[in-house]
Image (spheres, rainbow, N blue to C red):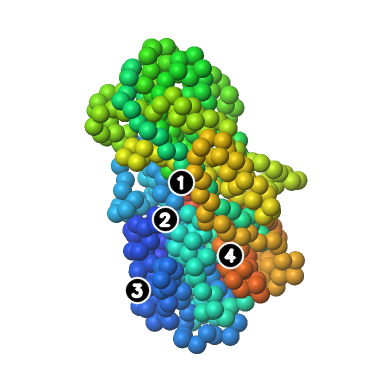
Amino acid sequence: MENDTLYTCARKWFDELCRIPRGSGNTEAVSGWLSRVGREMGLFVIRDPAGNVYMRAAETPEKNPLLLQAHMDMVCEKDSGVKHDFSRDPIYTIEEDGFLKARGTTLGADDGVGVAFALAALENRAELKPIEALFTVDEEIGLIGASKFDMSVTKAKRMINLDGGPENVAVVGAAGGERETLTLEYDPMPAAGTPVFIELDGLSGGHSGGAIDSGKKNALRELGRVLCDIYSENPFSLIAIGGGMKANAIPRSARAVVSCFDADAVMSRVAELESVIKGEFGHDDPDAATFTLTSGKFKSAMRSDYGISGELMMMSPRDTGRIISMLILAPNGVIRKDNGAVITSTNMGICQQSVRDGSVSFTFNSRSSVDSELDAVGMTLERLAHMLTMDIERTARYPGWRRDWDSKLQRQYADAYQKTFGGEISFVEIHGGLEGGILKTKSPELDVIATGPATHDVHTPREKLDLASYERFCAVMTALLKK
């Protein structure tokens, strides 16, 4: 097999994948497509009730197969002003300076490139050692597919999770995590005073695991800071509030509509705060150039943009204060590091208001390599919810996994890399959540690593795939898999 065969095939399959909407929670179409592709290849295919798709060459498993595993869903984020419907529109890609990018949206290389590689390997299976593939759903919203998959269908004792990278790095451990949703119910009342909108935009955001210690500002936290500052001198009532799109992405934008009695003073203070916050960025921080904090009179034409219809309603001063307290008091970001590595963190990822139900919810994505510390984060949020008279729901708990120091697969991958490029690889434990922990819990004897090509700025519209790295990754995997 030529070294570029798997790369060429993987590029083809990724192009196909970009045509299929596959945001988390919307994986029916891509799951069905994968099932059809597998059957057309003449493979034995299982599609389970959750939508996970498992494939191998024959109904009877081959001896000592290697399981290739990737998740089919993607994080759907887009730049402000970009008109893109992730439920039906394809991802429009562009190749530039050796990178593959999308036009104003996330690319879905996380983990579309893993899916594409596994399909390429299956297509060329006659020239490879025995392989199987597992494509899971809804990884990005709590590793849900992996938690529901029945591992008894495979006899594999080795698995490569294709959600890591770059190719000279093997992930051999990952953090566990959970989601916490805190909900405040309020009794709306007719709005009084002058409605003013306040919008914060232009932050770069990032992955709530890999980028949590990057120092990036969280738009919801900054909005809370702005609202708290204004409230101290010009008390107001909230009409609308929201920000963030995904729990596992650091929010890039947030906004609110307030009902106040001195609109000019509020707008003047917002302008001052924009200058203050911009002054906090470093000289080489790209957010310094893109960050904006704006305000103005709220016009009736803006109602649909904020999900407001009918009479303009506001929250009571007490409920307004509860929301401001939530924004500024909740834990957020890195909680503990050890020897430079993030051990425990949480991310306030989404604030969402339901005007019809009279509620505002806050969704956090918490992670830790230590179960007891993850429990402590959840308890902290529970106590905060109790203080602010809010409901809390803790869901999507998943385990991490710690490094196996006697791993045959780690040695095999290192040997394949050394033979291909003559260099050494790094073994790392990461703060991001990967499905290896869940699948290893289901099959304790499983030898697991995670790797893949280099991707950058995942979970943001700046996401890009390093094509040279993808080609190198395919070359290493060819050396590992070929007969």
Check disc 1 and give the amino acid type.
Lys
Where 152 sits versus 189, above or below?
Answer: below
Residue 17 as seen in the image, left or right of residue 478: left
Q: Residue drawn at (25%, 29%), measured in percent from left and top? A: 311
Image quadrant in which you'd find residue 371: bottom right
> Cα distance, mark 1 to mark 2?
10 Å
- Image quarter in which the C terminus is found: bottom right
- Label 4–label 2 contact, CB within 8 A: no
Mark 4 vs mark 1: which is more N-terminal?
A: 1
Q: Which residue is mark 3?
A: 36
Residue 186 at x, y percent in the picture = 40, 34
Q: Which residue is mark 2?
A: 24
Residue 424 as seen in the image, left or right of residue 184: right
Mark 3 vs mark 2: which is more N-terminal?
A: 2
Q: Residue drawn at (54%, 40%), measured in percent from left and top? A: 385
Q: Which residue is mark 4?
A: 438
Nearer the camera: disc 3 or disc 2? 2
Check disc 3 and give the amino acid type.
Arg
> Cα distance, mark 4 to mark 1?
22 Å
Where 427 sits versus 388, above or below?
Answer: below
Q: Which residue is mark 1?
A: 246
Q: Regarding mark 2 in the picture, which secondary structure is present there?
A: loop
Q: Nearer the viewer, residue 13 or 179?
A: 179
Q: Regarding mark 3 in the picture, which secondary structure is present there?
A: helix
